[in-house]
Image (spheres, grey):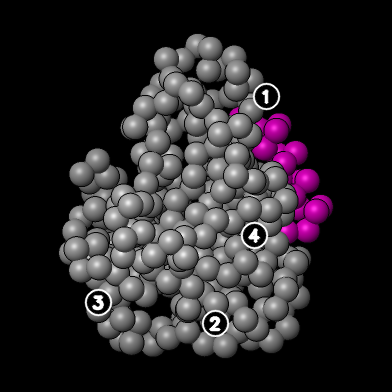
Amino acid sequence: MARLPTYWTYIREKPSWFFVLLGGRVLFIRKIERWWCGGMPRALPAGPVTRLVVDGAEMIVEEMVRDGVSRRVSLAASDVQAIRDFAETTLCTTRTAPVQSFMVRDLAAVNARRPRDVIAAYYFESVRLCPAIAAIESDPFLRDLAGAYMGTPPHHIRTRLWWSFPGSRVSDADLHAAAQNKYHFDLNGFRTVKFFFYITDVDTGAGPHAYVAGSHRHRRLRHQYTLMVGHEERELRDYYGDDQFMQVMGKAGTGFVEDPFLFHVGTSCRDRSRLLLEIEFGPHTASESYRYGVLG
């Protein structure tokens, strides 16, 4: 229920989003929407020039259809460094009260003035000021791959860059706002694709992304006919089995492509911070409030 004001804003800005809210959780309706719109996955076009590092491009769509995730993309070292430099010299902003903007190097001083630790800070619209991010966002390979998986021409929905930090003074509301409290799926549209890239090294202590393989294709009925998008890990393990629970770890530049209808979670950082770039495509444009993640 905490997200209802956000959903209402999306509907006011883009009334067609109401149909996503109404039927986007139901697998049968999602299949009908794909069929009706001619949005079945197709082969990736051959050979676009790309600045990404790609290993086995021909396997990506197949892996996404089967698992919901493919780990065959990564960033060049020069782009990783450029984005890291941008993040360290640009103000980031909290989304939970009290809202503050600060340089990441000043995190300890910011926490000293707050009742609870900052565990996430975002760059919102300022991502437009980073040339490396703009170049990656417009890379033809990303758009071709998103279009191949969705089965229709892609539209850029949003780009986000944000830090996740370790914190000891944290509330459940803080974890919920940072999407770190439980496995969930994103209700951004009937067919969307997200590209994620680690800009810092990520191991078990730095908040690795976790997901439940295949959960975009199989879903308990009670997880479809509900307003809730988040569910307890124990409940999901009982249904999907432990062998479907995956974590993505790797050096800075590691990337992966995901269908965000998959159950996933960004785990909490324990001892090191994580900087993550996310670029999302869909068959339609999104509302302005969604575009840079200000509301969620």
- Residue shown at 58% from the left, 70% from the top: 70
Residue lying furthest top in this view? 113
Which amino acid is tagged 1?
A: Arg
Characterize the local packing of mark 4: few (<14), some (14-19) or many (20 or more) Cα atoms within 10 angstroms. many
Q: Which mark is residue 255?
A: 4
In screen coordinates, is 67 left or right of 289? right
Main SS of the magenta part reads helix
Q: In terms of sequence position, does the residue under pointer 4 or pointer 2 come before the other?
A: 2
Q: How packed is label 3: few (under 14 Cα within 10 Å), some, or many (20 or more)?
A: some
Q: Earlier in the sequence, mark 4 or mark 3?
A: 3
For the residues marked 4 and 2, what is the alpha-carbon distance in whole angstroms?
17 Å
- Which numbered disc, 3 or 1, marks the residue that appears first in the sequence? 3
Instruction: Give the magenta range.
Output: 75-91
C-alpha span from label 4 to label 3: 30 Å
Task: Say which of 236 and 47 sits in front.
Answer: 236
User: Does residue 158 appear in the picture of this structure?
Assistant: no
Name the N-terminal-most of marks 2 and 1.
2
Q: Residue at x 42, y 15 (%)?
A: 115
Q: Nearer the viewer, mark 4 or mark 3?
A: 4
**Comes first in the chain, label 2 or label 3:** 3
- Cβ atoms under marks 4 and 3 closer than 8 Å: no
* 131 relative to 283, above or below: above
Indicate the position of residue 218 as horizontal and vertical percent values.
33, 73
- Give the CA distance from mark 4 to mark 1: 25 Å
Task: Point out which mark residue 62 bears.
Answer: 2
For disc 3, the marked residue is 29
